[in-house]
């Protein structure tokens, strides 16, 4: 459990094949939504190890870390989820491009909370989906043009 004053650091994966983004499909009271795979870094684990472990657990694939794409702060009090503000959630996400080196994406042995399935979303249609973080959508449309890591700021 995240303590109220902790900043949670996580490694996230952007996996794109044939101009489609691999995403975990979830559902809440407002319908379906999507997130990118990855999660919290464990103590004594580097970001690459965290990324590899999280992808294995959530989407049942082995990945190779490639380049840094984005850094994102998420300070719950500044966004639309009141439960995050009440718990004083603060996440720092380091988002990497990753390549699948083994396996076929599906729900892994420890899927993310509420994860229903794994789906491929066309990059040129991302506006049609509730993808979190939302700030990724405008950048991923031009995925191949990203030359260096982008700090997204405190965004949802």
Image (cartoon, rainbow, N blue to C red):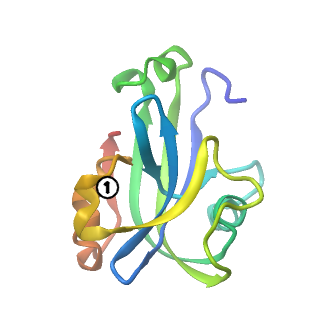
Q: Residue at x 72, y 60 (%)?
A: 57
Q: Residue furthest top?
A: 86
Q: Is residue 31 above or below residue 44?
A: above
From the image, tell me which residue sits under label 1: 136
Q: Residue at x 67, y 24 (%)?
A: 3
Q: Indicate the position of residue 43 as horizontal and vertical percent values.
A: 76, 48
What is the quadrant of residue 77 in the picture? top left
Q: Relative to 145, is 15 on the left or the right?
A: right
How packed is label 1: few (under 14 Cα within 10 Å), some, or many (20 or more)? some
Residue 17 sits in which quadrant? bottom left
The reply, left or right, for residue 60 in relation to residue 95 is right
Tally of marks: 1
Q: Which residue is drawn at the image coordinates 32% and 52% (left, top)?
A: 129
Indicate whether 3 appears above or below 72: above
Observer-nearest of 3 and 23: 23
The quadrant in which the N terminus is found is: top right
Residue 79 image point, x, y percent: 35, 27
126 or 85: nearer the viewer: 126
Q: 124 or 15, which is in the foreground?
A: 124
Q: Measured from the top left, where is residue 27 in percent x and y? A: 50, 40
**Disc 1, SS:** helix
Task: From the top left corner, tell me how far across and down residue 93 is, in percent.
Answer: 49, 49
Quadrant in the picture for the C terminus: top left
Above/below status of 99 relative to 24 = below
């Amino acid at each position: 459990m995240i303590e109220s004053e902790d900043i949670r650091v996580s490694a996230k994966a952007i996996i794109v094949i044939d101009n489609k983004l691999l995403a975990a499909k979830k559902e809440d009271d407002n319908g379906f939504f999507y997130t990118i795979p990855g999660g919290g870094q464990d103590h004594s684990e580097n970001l690459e190890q965290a990324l590899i472990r999280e992808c294995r657990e959530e989407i049942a694939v082995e990945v190779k870390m490639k380049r840094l794409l984005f850094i994102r702060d998420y300070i719950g009090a500044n966004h639309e989820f009141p439960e995050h503000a009440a718990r004083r959630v603060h996440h720092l996400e380091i988002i990497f491009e990753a390549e699948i080196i083994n396996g076929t994406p599906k729900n892994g042995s420890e899927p993310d909370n509420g994860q229903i399935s794994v789906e491929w979303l066309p990059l040129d249609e991302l506006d049609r989906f509730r993808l979190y973080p939302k700030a990724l959508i405008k950048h991923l449309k031009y995925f191949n043009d990203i030359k260096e890591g982008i700090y997204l700021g405190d965004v949802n």
